[in-house]
Amino acid sequence: MPAVLEAADVKKSYQMGKLTVSALRGVTLRIEEGEFVAILGPSGSGKSTLLHVLGGLDRPEYGEVLIDNISLYALNDSRLADVRLHKIGFVFQFFNLLPRLTALKNVELPLTLADVPEHESMKNAKEMLELVGLGDRLNHRPTELSGGEQQRVAIARALINEPKIVLADEPTGNLDTTTGGEIVHLMQRLNKEKEKTFVVVTHDPGVAENADRILSLKDGLIQGEKRGTGDAHS
Amino acid sequence: MRRKQILAMAWENMKLRRFRTSLTTLGVVIGITAIIGLASLGEGFRVTIKQEMEQGFELNVLTVMSGGLLTGVGSYFTDDDVKNISQISGVLLATPLIQKSVGKLYNDGENTTALVLLAINYTEFRQIYPDRLTIEHGDWPQTVKNDTAVLGYNVEHPKEGEAFANTGQNVTIAMSFTSQFSGRYFHNYTFNIAGTLAKSGAAGFINFDDAAFAPLDTVRKIYNTTNSDMIFVRIADSSYSQSVAKAIESRFGGAGEVRVLVPAAFMVQVESILSMLQIFLTGVASIALLVAGLGIMNIMTVSVMERTREIGILKAIGARSRTILTMFLTEAALIGLLGGVVGVPLGYALAQVMGRFLFRFSAEVTPRRSLITGAQTQPLTEVSPILSPEWIFIAMVFAVGVSVIFGWYPARKAAKLEPVQALRYE
């Protein structure tokens, strides 16, 4: 399988007052097309930082990140934004939907940014919302939706531009166990049916165990790798 | 991202914060109202004054006098001089004139005073001021007899409602002479009144209402001269003023020998003063718009802070910095545009109101004598503001321009936000 995402010796630190904290101390990893990979680590292990760096949101001090063979941090800011728009989908812990837009408009947003004509973007967004099981919630605003529903909208938004990879940052972190399970299940279904590549960052072993592969992150380094239950399908 | 979409999003955002947007826009409205109001009122004022002055100054008439200290004393110009001047290109007509101060005029025990006796060629002089000298009673002498006179309005009416003499009557004019030995003395001459003038006002330094007119040849005989004091020159257009004045001066050997009064030269000065006044007023009004600009900057800075997270989300899902910048600038521009669209008609309305009442008020508190014409004219009670398309254009560009310039800093700040930081922002 070809690699969708490759990271080589990624290092990143940040300032906390006078202290320099090394969040990532040389992370190397490789994600193949169609994989469902979990990055498991306790809080403070640098998971979120890693995800941001992998997704082109945060420049590392050292190392290289390739998505679809494009070296992200060799690009200027607007090219990098284009890569985020077309090749990466994000799912966040706090959903990060635009509160004044309806579910439909939220999902449409990346298409609008990509200059897809309005009638087409509307149709696609509708289909995508139906796919995540929200066909009857199109015109609801985020405040009128439950947490699980909001996260489904976020997943729909992440997938709408046919990205090469979806990066999810604690997607169940703000949901109860049942709803969280449903969200994981949805992502797995999309992974299998639509052959979408997922990287899920989590501190919850219960979430991670459903993945094909589980990478353990600790102290800014990948400390180990094991097969998850999801591996059985591929 | 397409312009239409950005526009729609900006509009949505403005609607969402309706109250705030309205207040910010109001600032621009006030600024533009002030600018358009004062500019169009100033323009109307300028044009009105200019028209009044053009009438008062008779821009197409130049007056040639002898130069130096002896001005007005003695007869200087020969009829050849007059002929010479009339041949200069741009000159329609040149006519000689003798000006004498006179004392009283008598008619059967009635008397009146003329400040000045103008000895003229009736036919020619009327062509110098075709629009000004209108007859009240009688007529200009059709065939000039040596004893025909015409009286100015104030001479004929020493008191309002009274008439000094009827046309056809003979009156006695006491004409003054200066002698080396006995100083000033008077001789009486009899003239037949051919006509009297309606109110004619003044042109340059001659007030026709206070003048009596007599035939040039007759006065020349009385004073034993073949020359004249002044030459009145009518030119085809006021644009010839300078060239004709130069030509006249050079014919008399330079500017020291003769003086040519060019009313258009006054006009240029007056006009530059009025233009300066208009620019000054508009400049003052612009301050209001600048204050509005600061309001926009202020409110957009707050807006950027409030929307930090939203900006982070947009950037994370692939919006370019440029798109964010354009979004915020579009909002600023829309506020400016809105302010301009409301402010321009409002400003014009304000100018109408001010033009109607301000000058009426000032006319009531100032003496009813216009500085410019020096005679009884209607005081300036109303000024019709003039709103030119140029000013509308300038105001709109200014409104949008100021908004965008002041919106630039907060918009730039929004565009430069790091997506990760923005996402963390609560």
Image (tube, coloured by chain):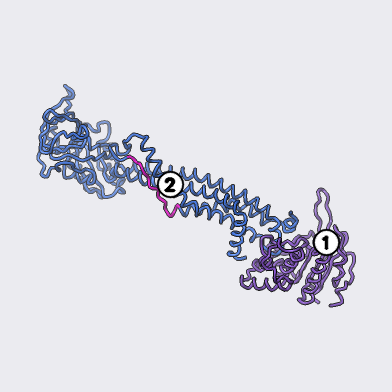
Chain colours: A purple, B blue
- Residue B382 painted magenta: yes
The amino acid pointed to by label 2 is Ala
Which quadrant holds residue B190? Answer: top left
- Work out whether residue B135 or residue B127 is closer to the camera in this orientation and state it: B135
CA–CA distance between discs 2 and 1? Answer: 66 Å
Q: Residue at x 58, y 64 (%)?
A: B3
Residue B232, image x and y in percent? 23, 42
Secondary structure that dominates the magenta span: loop
Q: What stretch is highlighted in magenta?
A: B379-391
Q: Mark 1 lies on which chain?
A: A
Compared with B119, A148 (above or below) is below
Q: Quadrant of the C terminus of chain B?
A: bottom right
In the structure shown, which secondary structural element does the residue marked by tag 2 occupy? helix
In the structure shown, which secondary structural element does the residue marked by tag 1 occupy? helix
Residue B315 visible in the snapshot: no
Compared with A47, B200 (above or below) is above
Q: Residues within 10 Å of mark 1 (few under 14, many from 20)?
A: many
Residue A47, label in figure: 1
Q: In which quarter of the image is the N terminus of chain B?
A: bottom right
Which quadrant holds residue B270? Answer: top left
Q: Residue at x 86, y 67 (%)?
A: A208
Compared with A12, B85 (above or below) is above
The amino acid pointed to by label 1 is Lys
- Work out whether residue B292 or residue A33 is closer to the camera in this orientation and state it: B292
State which mark lies toward you, 2 or 1: 2
Locate residue A104 relative to residue B154 in the image: left or right.
right
Residue B351, label in figure: 2
Q: Are marks 2 and 1 on the same chain?
A: no
Residue A68, image x and y in percent? 75, 71
Q: Which chain carries label 2?
A: B
Compared with B328, B174 (above or below) is above
